Amino acid sequence: MSARGLMVGSVVLASVLGLSACGEKPQTATQRKVDATAYSGSTVKGYTEQGWKAGDKVSWEGQMRERNKGQNEYQR
């Protein structure tokens, strides 16, 4: 093999290796993993609201409605 063929081959190899580093990994959508329901609550007293019962969905929804009052910019 001649010096010119060796040089062309090394340039081609370098460009192929250089371009392969620019490739993007495939992205696949995955389901969000949820450990527990939002209303199951915390066991730490400082993180819970007074009057809220952990595990009670109706109580949790009521607390969320109460918490969101006054946060609608269109009603101010």
Image (cartoon, helix red, strand yellow):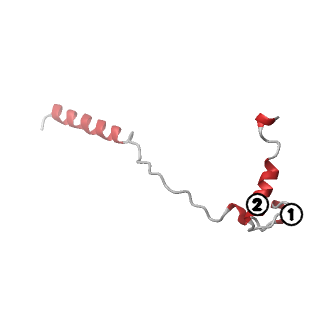
At label 1, the amino acid type is Gly
* Residue in view at x 41 percent, y 47 percent: 25
Residue placed under numbered mark 2 in the picture: 60
| Rendering coords of residue 35 (x, y %) | 62, 65
In front here: 51 or 26?
Answer: 51
Give the quarter of the image for residue 2. Answer: top left
On screen, residue 72 above or below 59 = above
Pointer 1 with pointer 2, Cβ within 8 A? no
Whole-number angstrom distance, CA of label 1 to CA of label 2 = 10 Å
* Residue in view at x 41 percent, y 43 percent: 24
Residue placed under numbered mark 1 in the picture: 51
Q: Secondary structure at mark 2?
A: helix
At label 2, the amino acid type is Trp
Give the quarter of the image for residue 6. Answer: top left
- State the mark number for residue 33: none
In front here: 74 or 51?
Answer: 74
